[in-house]
Amino acid sequence: MKKLMNDPKQFVPEMMKGIELANPGTIKYVPEYNLVMRADAPNPNKVSIVQGSGSGHEPAHIMVVGKGMLDGACPGDVFSAPPMDYVVESSKILNSPKGILHIVNNYSGDRMSFEMATEMLDMEGVTVKTIFVDDDVAVQNSTWTVGRRGVAGNFFVIKAVGAAAEAGASLDELVELGKKVNSRLRSMGMALTGCTPPAKGKPIFTLEEDEIEMGVGIHGEPGRARKKLASANEIADEMLEAILTDRKPIPGGDDREEPIFHEGDEVALMINGLGGTPISELYIVYGHVHEELEKRGIKIWRSYVGEYCTSLEMAGMSITLCKVDDQLKELFTAPAEIPIRVF
Amino acid sequence: MSDSTLAVTERVVRTIADVALENEFYFAELDGVVGDGDFGLSLANGFRKLMDEWDTLDRSSPGTFLKKVSMIITSRVGGVSGAIWGTGFMRAGFAAGDKAELTADDVIAMLRAAEEGMKKRGQSDVGDKTLLDGFIPAVDELERVLKSGGSTQEALDAAAVKAREQTEVIKPWIAKRGRAAYTGERSMDTYDAGSIAVAVMAETIAASWPEISNP
């Protein structure tokens, strides 16, 4: 393992301290609960939005805390869900008379922690509602999930509800909006390499020189298949096809939704780096996906190319499409002020 | 009960913690047959952390105390088992509310609340070969003996016997929940680690009840 670090146990706290020091006056760090929060939160006229997840996905989610995005993020250790008490205490610190919105990527550990925290907060009179994000089309269930995984597409959920909350939306309106964005999101990822969590010291998986993991999750969980390396265009084509033909299972039965992207649609297109892929390669993928979508009559309304949700130093990328309408366009372009300025 | 409810609650939790710590490797070994072997270890980690913070816990009522216990063990017991055990303590704490003294009926209501919470959290029920197959029949037995006029000691003894019997009843079953479920038929004819833990805890509480209730 070769990393810029001092002590594996201090990896997350030292990163958080850095974020606080780099953003004086706007970001506050509460070490007891791994909480990075807006210094001006909670705002009594606005729903507070809190995300958990594990660490190791930066800038998700501690670096998207700020005006127009999250009010706070209280991640667990690298690739670990936050313990329940982080969620309970962070939500109490950020409690607003308009309520608290939790955004949870659909992973079993995160779900359990947030569901327990919600019970605890309900008993204490804190109003909490939750949006679950499950944008990954690669696999239906995985090592760590029941149902689909929530991956890079959660950025669009945060951006939309963050902007709407800033404009005064109610908790119920935000829940509806979050569900709407999630229903219009589809993502898929692939890995060229594994990555090494600091406390583990060894790669979570290893790929040969000529191998890729297609449909990888954001903690390196296996995806659809381990394949031979192909050209950027071939890899992108396979992922795009999976996204465009995806029929999401409808909970509670064997029925599936129809594919959601059609000729004439406008989309936000994200090419997300997983941490170890140069931006040059991301733009190679972007160019091809852009042309392929235009060929199908799907218009790219706005592009997002860079690192939004990573897996430490893993090389690889994910593609996310979000179908937009006038409401979402307005929310996605609303101003935001966060430590990592990616838009 | 001749001693305050809070003191009794503390001693019951303390007894459960002692069992988890003393049987760390035994439970892990049972779980290792079909699960991933971390059950005993992570359960002990949770209760070890609880012991570290024991003196600082909020003791304003038995319910508050149990909620605090839940927060601590959940923060250290990894994965699904942490959430399920934590939910049990949490729901029992909710059911106790702010009451300073608890009656036998209150305790039954707390155990039923714990049962409901664990079912919901684990999306599981009796018949899935989990700790619920030990816990629920044992609570049934506790309630039956108390309602028919038996003493607390008699009720606890009966519950402990039932919990132990259940570990044998479910041994031939195929696990339907938890890591053990992934191993399918291999889980047949193996003990379920969670229900064994429940049996050992019930037996230990019953055996030490004279000291727990009136030291």
Image: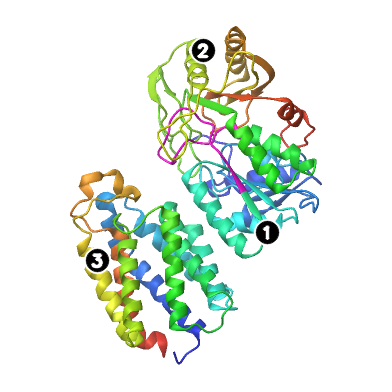
Q: Position of residue A255 (x, y in %)?
A: 43, 31
> Which residue is labeled 1 in the image?
A92
Q: Please identify, in this view, whether the residue under mark 2 or under mark 3 is nearer the observer.
A: 3
Q: Please identify, in this view, whether the residue under mark 3 or under mark 1 is nearer the observer.
A: 3
- Which of the two residues, B88 or B79, is positioned nearer the viewer here? B88
Q: Position of residue B179 (x, y in %)?
A: 33, 48
Left or right for A175, reference B104: right
> Which residue is labeled 3 in the image?
B166
Please tell me how many numbered marks the rendered image carries.
3
The chain letter under disc 1 is A
Q: Position of residue A281 (x, y in %)?
A: 58, 16
**What color scheme is it?**
rainbow
Give the spatial CA distance, label 3 vs label 1: 42 Å
Q: Residue furthest top?
A: A295
At mark 2, the secondary structure is helix
Instruction: Identify the residue at image location x=40%, y=39%.
Output: A143
Q: Amino acid at mark 2?
A: Ala
> Which residue is labeled 2 in the image?
A232
Q: Please identify, in this view, whether the residue under mark 1 or under mark 2 is nearer the observer.
A: 1
The chain letter under disc 2 is A
The chain letter under disc 3 is B
Magenta segment main secondary structure: loop
Q: Which mark is residue A105?
A: none
At mark 3, the secondary structure is helix
Q: Amino acid at mark 1?
A: Lys
Q: Image height check: is B166 above or below A310?
A: below
- Which of the two residues, A5 or A216, is positioned nearer the viewer here? A216
Q: Are marks 1 and 2 in contact (CB under 8 Å)?
A: no
How dense is the environment of label 1, judged by Cα within 10 Å: few (below 14), some, or many (20 and up)? some
Left or right for A164, reference B140: right
Q: Where does the magenta region start and end?
A: A130-154
Mark before the other along the chain sequence, 1 or 2? 1
